[in-house]
Amino acid sequence: MRFQFIASEIWIGLRRNLSMTVAVIIVTFVSLTFIGSAALLQTQIGKFKDDWYGKVEVSVLLCPVNSAKPVCASGEATSEQIAQIEQVLESPEIAPEIETVTFESKAEAWESFADRFEGQWLLSQVSEEDMNASFRIKLTDPSNYQVIADILTGRAGVEEVQDQRQILEPIFRVLGGATLVAAGLAAVMLLAAILLITTTIRLSALSRRRETGIMRLVGASNFFIRLPFMLEGAIAALIGGILSVTGLWFAVKYLVQAQQSSTMQWVPVVTTSEVWRLAPWLIITAVAVAMVASALTLRRYLKV
Amino acid sequence: MIRFDNVTKVYARGARPALHDISLEIEREEFVFLVGASGSGKSTFLRLVLREERATSGTVFVAGRDLGNLSNWKVPALRRQIGAVFQDFRLLPNKTVFENVAFALQVTGRPRHQIRTTVPEALELVGLAGKEKRRPHELSGGEQQRVAIARAMVNRPPILLADEPTGNLDPTTSLGIMRLLDRINRTGTTVVMATHDDEIVDQMRKRVIELQTGDLVRDQSRGVYGASR
């Protein structure tokens, strides 16, 4: 009886304020979609970092034949200089920082360059003589780049120490910025959602003043009087939450994952399973916000 | 059943008190008229009994409870002990007679089988058997008030408060409502009725409590509406 009664009360409330209910659903839908996007973007950045930082190397470029840089004024790096650098890399101070070292000779560098730009104009403009021989160093901890750079920079035969991570930093900065924008929009929309829920519940309470007045009079408990209103807000928020999860799922499935399988297979991207992991949190947030907003409104509008 | 000990109620700080130092006791199964001009404090008296308001000073006891110390969450339990009817009936227009009476049971969480048996009993008591499916606008004023009384009594409360229940009704209909209230009183319910209706008060010869601008000016058993009129 109770359950059926409360359910019918809720249904009456939702129908009476249909336009407001729809507005609450839409606003929670949009705000949760932004929150979800921000969270997924953050996950995506994490994935990129895990994947790419595992692959990046520090390149110690050795002086080529004709270098414009003053450190290479004495010409191409000699085999003695190369041996010296090798010794430094094996010295006890920096050996623990290094996972693997590979030496790429001028000829090998040329080979991979020729491979990559085969048939293109650029290839006709350079020769093997323009290539750098280099040490490719994989660090145990990629963030310790500076240690290697400090020791090797300016050493005889070393033209430049390059950290590939620095090439990636701008990409992460852009993605981080996008996360912030999404989170900011989410916060604004969430505020709008709270205000809208508050107004809707207030309207709902006013339009049923007669009923609630009688309920008080015949001794219905406060909880019983307020529950239908609180559930009304919660149900609207729940529908908004389900819509946003659905929206995110479709976006990830048909935009992100479809894109990946056709053009950028080498990039790890977020998957629908991450959306599922996010879903309960989004929905719990929506329902909790709606319940708290309703409860606070009702405290003012339905007194004992 | 109801006891006021030196009760004063002031709504706004500094204003004239709505009730001033009232002390009285209403016994179990009594029938009491509360008379006085508009603004004399009749409604405030009833609101204090229902704990819609708290006394500014003094103590109100209802059904053995000290309302000054009653915490908010216990107020619903108090109100289940009190039936209340008003001049404007306060029925729900989109519900039938049966549903209006059942509403009081539903919102206090009674099981369905209990509603099925007690609602017809209450409608029988007020003489509306057979009109269960009507809506309030299809009934006369007197019948609507009977529905309100059925709703007030369906929980079988020991106290019935009536705030000018005949205020909107013609004399013949009013008399019918009075007979009903008298019958309810005879079955063991304490009835407190605030009214302007001198004819009814004079006819019934019950205890009369008269208020005048917040003061208790008369408490007379088997009284009449009053000479001050």
Image (cartoon, coloured by chain):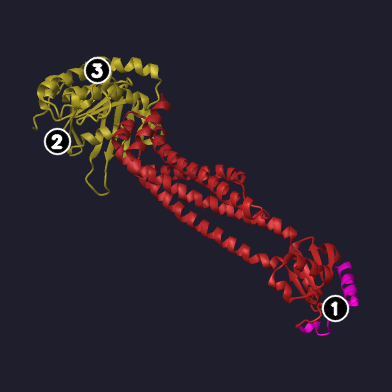
The residue identified by callout 2 is B37
**x, y (%) of residue B101?**
29, 23
Question: In the rendered structure, which amino acid carries the disc numbered 1?
Answer: Ala
**Label 3 vs label 1, nearer the camera:** 1
Q: Main secondary structure of the magenta part?
A: helix
Q: Dot 3: what SS?
A: helix
Q: Which of marks 2 and 3 is nearer the N terminus?
A: 2
Span shown in magenta = A69-93
Residue B186 appears in the figure: no
Q: Which tint was used for chain B?
A: yellow
Q: Assess whether mark 1 and mark 2 are in contact (beta carbons under 8 angstroms).
A: no
Q: What residue is pinned by disc 3?
A: B184
Mark 1 belongs to which subunit?
Answer: A
Tell me how far mark 2 sits from mark 1, CA to CA: 114 Å
Within 10 Å of the Cα at label 2, are there few (<14), some (14-19), or many (20+) other Cα atoms? some
State how many labels appear.
3
Secondary structure of the residue carrying numbered label 1: loop
Q: Colour of chain A?
A: red
Q: What element carries label 2?
A: loop
How far, Cα to Cα, is label 3 from label 1?
115 Å
The amino acid type of the residue labelled 3 equals Ile
Left or right for B224, reference A137: left
Query: Residue beneath label 1, please?
Result: A77
Q: Which of marks 2 and 1 is in front?
A: 1
Q: Is residue B126 left or right of residue A67?
A: left
Asked if B172 appears above or below A225 in the picture, the reply is above
Estimate the spatial distance between the alpha carbons at disc 2 and disc 3, rounded to whole Å: 26 Å
